[in-house]
Amino acid sequence: MAKQKKRKTLNDSADWNFDLLEQYQVEIERVAKHYRLDTYVNQIEVITTEQMMDAYASVGMPIGYNHWTFGKKFIQTEQTYKRGRMGLAYEIVINSNPCIAYLMEENTLPMQALVMAHACYGHNSFFKNNYLFKSWTDADSIIDYLLFAKNYIAKCESKYGIDEVEATLDACHALMNHGVDRYKRPQKLSLDEELKRQKDREEYLESQVNTLWRTLPKNPDKNDEKPPSFPSEPQENILYFIEKNAPLLKSWQREIVRIVRKVSQYFYPQKQTQVMNEGWACFWHYTILNHLYDEGLVTDKFMLEFLHNHTNVVAQPEYNSPYYSGINPYALGFNMFTDLRRICEYPTDEDKKWFPDIAGSNWLDTLHFAMETFKDESFISQYLSPKLMRDLKLFNINDNEDNNFVEIAAIHNEQGYQQIRSILSSQYNLSNLEVNIQVINVDINGDRSLTLRYIPQNEVPLGKSKDEVLKHLHYLWQFDVKLVQADEQGKDMIIAACSNKTENSN
Amino acid sequence: MTNFIDRRLNGKNKSMVNRQRFLRRYKSQIKKSLAEAINKRGVTDVSSGENITIPKKDLSEPFFHQGDGGNKNKIHPGNDQFTTGDRIPRPKKQQGQGGGDSEASDSGEGDEDFVFSISKDEYLNLLFEDLELPNLERNQLDKLIEYKTVRTGYCADGVPANIDIVKSLQGSISRRIAMTSSKRKELKKLQEKLILLQQDKIDRFSEITALEKQITELKDKIANVPFIDTFDLRFRNYAKQAIPTSKAVMFCLMDVSGSMDQATKDIAKRFYILLYLFLTRTYKKIDVVYIRHHTQAKEVDEQEFFYSQETGGTIASSALELMTKIIDERYNASDWNIYGAQASDGDNWADDSPKCEELLRKKILPVARYFSYIEITQRAHQTLWHKYTEVAESNSHFSMRHIKTVDDIYPVFRDLFKKNTTVSA
């Protein structure tokens, strides 16, 4: 440590330039290595506010196909930003290899340092090492794939007309959350393969579908046998089911369904690791910059500005605050990782009882292990400590439709810890957030109608938008579509339907 | 390994296409919103952007989601007063579902409208989309000739202003080369001969002097070839080319008499402002003649037409008369596409209406491409309207509309100028 004392402190002025960024980058990288953060190569791009709003509109995708919803998003962002209702994020980082991070031109130098530590080393290492990202996304090929998608859709637009393509995309977007096989890991995406296979797929798919709908009975002898139901098992990946089985879709439409499905799959890990991902990044920008401060490389002035921003980001307003809008994932995640380090370094008796395996262990090993092996749901149920529940004063409200009151079901005390932890964990369980709808039957020999079943969680009914979504599904399937839900006796009742007769053109 | 890239100079309008897509999709709603907005504008405020309002439900991107009800458990931070088992009456409205759009909207899906602004260009484009001047004709070549001057190569004479220096000097160089080349060859020969003679051991003085004399003469001859000659001069040539034309003139006739109250005048002005914007935006070369009248008609400029006030009785024919006079003086019907738009509250001196009808029938309609009349009134129609109805029945390029309130202006305007319209009365 003595030799580092000799280092000159880094410039702490507000204005940045590329030389200074480079200097900070080198130091941050050195410290990140010291903490064994394993990252993709960084590509740091400096952009303007306008460009940041562009990036917002395309959900952070550097290359997006064209669609009106992105235009709407852009207009909304622009409006709220110009009215001063919202600040823009300081950075956006993309799960790709090299890992692209956008820094806003307007940030001050300390902010740029914070953002580099946060995005280029925090998020980046998370993308590279978390099991969900490893198995669900392919950082090497995502940019290529997005480019392929953009070009393909542009080509379709000029070939088949903007309206047709738009309607298909609208329908796919409505079902975007139902485009992932949760229990099957996807194949890796690769541009070359995509292109190579796309042509074959077009033809192959047509033939597949034709077989399915062949009207001539294959084997007249077995006519009396009850026809097997199709699909043989319920399918939760509705988009995949459509792509493979919708009878009248054109091949280019199938390809578009596939594109939306793949993009949705790319964002699938992101949805499940928000708390961890942000928590990890916050923990590291905090730790790295403090490390630099301890080495005497950054000044007090720098630290004050940094801490000011840091505390803003990880603030958790209380339930009765006007700023309260649910639990802040940055706050929860940051506090959990910090707490985890504390449990390793300075365990109390309580920690020893609750976390016998990690209390007193090497904190860095433990944190890396946690980051690599969990998603939000399991991370919380594994590591949310009683101390943190007390610090955040967490409590559980039960809101049962049958009562005319809401009840405090548990608070941050000895009796409530387990319950709070399990409920908070389930709050991040994707299957509790997204509705469970499965394709259960297609009437192959009859009117080709498609039946889906809604399986409610905690008796929560399906929201009002179901009729609208069904219209979109009908657009893709092009025959009658029914949505059923089992009643108390277990009998399926139709809760929404869209048939050819009632079809509303969109 | 880290790369820094400065992207700030990259195009910023990455989302422009998406914005266009958005406008395209909601064109009908946007137009509806525009039609409402145009009437709320101040008369002077003609060409700024506009705020567009679209009901939020039209913009929804539906997806399956959980509804209200059921048995829900949620964790909140910051407990300051509760213990297990406390019961609290349920708040009237559900506290959203966490991921609501904004904190302000208390119901799951806000009912507030989606408001955004469009630029001036987008505004005007939408405002006048699919509108055109009816019956606009490109006058035939033989009928009306308008000339355009075009360059047509070079010629040997012209005015000094048209001298093409490069061409002329090129001519001069080539002429000089042509005129001196044989002499230069000869000169070269003589010079070689001279050198031979000088080197000769025998004295050939007389021969040398003769040769030298020859050489000087030749040199003089070469020098005497003029650097530039009138023969070299080249002039840019211009020719007049006849081109078809679509010159148009619009006559705006407005009643400003005492019977026109402020509100009516306001409506008329709004109509004309719309017309003016439409014309100036769509047609580069178009003359607009403003005529206002009470008992007498007067040609005025744009400013006066829209913003000054008058009172008095009404004799509508005075304006029509002035219009015919101006047509005779300045706008030959074979050269010009003539349009007229008249606005009035229908009040006219009863004996004057037949005169108006006659003027229209005999003088104006035969030369005009299109004439529209709008009557702005809440009352029953009077003589002018009835007389004009007769005109409209027999003339397809005359049309009349009735405007009751401000809200009618834009629809009527669109109706009058919509593309490929077969004009009906």
Image (spheres, coloured by chain):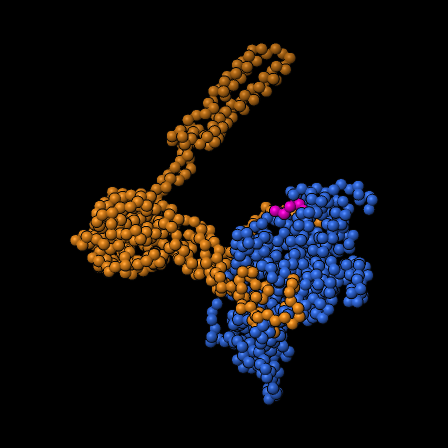
Chain colours: A blue, B orange
In the figure, A104 relative to B53: above or below?
Answer: above
Residue B219 in the magenta stretch? The answer is no
**Relative to A265, is A463 on the left or the right?**
left
- Quick check: A90 above or below B393? above
With respect to residue A401, does B341 lie above or below? Answer: above
Provide the residue span drawn in magenta: A105-110
Q: Residue at x 62, y 64 (%)?
A: A264
Residue at the image position 74 percent from the left and 42 percent from the top: A9
* Residue A106 shown in magenta: yes
Along the viewing direction, whichever of B236 and B202 lies nearer the viewer = B236
Front in this rendered view, residue B369 or A456: A456
Total labels: the figure holds 0
Q: Picture quarter containing residue B305? A: top left
Q: Nearer the viewer, residue B201 or B326?
A: B326
Which quadrant does the C terminus of chain B fall into? bottom left
**Can the viewer see residue B137 in this picture?**
no
Query: Which x, y percent locates residue A413?
Result: 71, 67
Indicate the position of residue B325 as horizontal and vertical percent values. Answer: 23, 45
Q: Residue at x 80, y 44 (%)?
A: A4
Does residue B312 lie above or below A201 as drawn?
above
Residue B202 in view in this figure = yes
Compared across the picture, whether B113 is left or right of B408 comes to: right
**Predominant SS along the magenta part:** loop
